Amino acid sequence: MTGEFTQAKGILMTKPSVVVAPMDAWVVRYVNKLKNMMGLSHWTILMQTKPSSPDALGETEVVHGQHLAKMYLHKDFRKDTATDFRATVVHELLHCHMAHLSEIVSEILQVEDDDPKGKAILKTTVNVLDYEIERIIDAISESLGKWMPLPDMPKERVVKKVAKKKVIKKK
């Protein structure tokens, strides 16, 4: 058993370490291919094995100044059609281009700690901006996505049932 060792009441115990399988190689290849086609070749996209929130097909955390993004896909993405998977990846990559807008607005509208009205205005402004950015990304990904190549998704494995031979005894 691998893991971290801890000591409790003089007893040496091991905590099992969490083993996370790497993201499927075909996903990483596909995301890298699209990021290069979408003007993000200087970005590092880290594909996360942890699924996105249940109400999302994907999520992306962007660190714009470092050209870094963590992309999360929904837990059943392997069951998506190639077209749906392409749409999700294009959408999530577009967040890399757009995420800094909210950061810029927050910096421009800096609010003092003792200004509750200013904080409320900033929060509302950023929420409206984030909503509109999401709509813009939806529109761009729908029009751009159809021009992007489809992923080479693995074929679903079909387990063939082998009929059992019946033995007939001669009398």
Image (spheres, grey):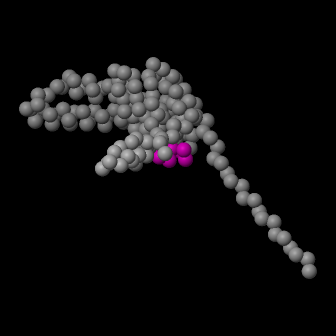
Instruction: Estimate the x, y position of residue 29 in percent, counting from the top left.
Output: 56, 30
Residue located at (22% from left, 27% from top): 106
78 vs 125: above or below? below
Is residue 79 magenta-colored? yes
Left/right of residue 128 with respect to residue 23 in the rendered view:
left
Asked if residue 137 shows in the view, the reply is: no
Left/right of residue 131 with respect to residue 148 in the rendered view:
left
Residue located at (35% from left, 49% from top): 11
- When asked about the image quadrant of residue 50, the answer is top left
Given residues 22 and 69, the one toward you in this image is 22
Given residues 3 and 79, the one toward you in this image is 3
Instruction: Estimate the x, y position of residue 70 in percent, counting from the top left.
Output: 41, 32
Instruction: Estimate the x, y position of residue 3 in percent, counting from the top left.
Output: 43, 42
Instruction: Estimate the x, y position of residue 38 in percent, counting from the top left.
Output: 48, 24
Left/right of residue 71 with respect to residue 109 in the rendered view:
right
Instruction: Name the residue furthest bottom.
Output: 171
Instruction: Name the residue furthest top.
Output: 42
91 vs 56: above or below? above
Is residue 158 magenta-colored? no
The quarter of the picture where the C terminus appears is: bottom right
- When asked about the image quadrant of residue 131, the answer is top left
Q: Which residues are magenta?
A: 73-80
Given residues 86 and 49, the one toward you in this image is 49
Residue located at (26% from left, 23% from top): 104
Instruction: Name the residue furthest left.
Output: 114
Residue located at (44% from left, 24% from top): 44
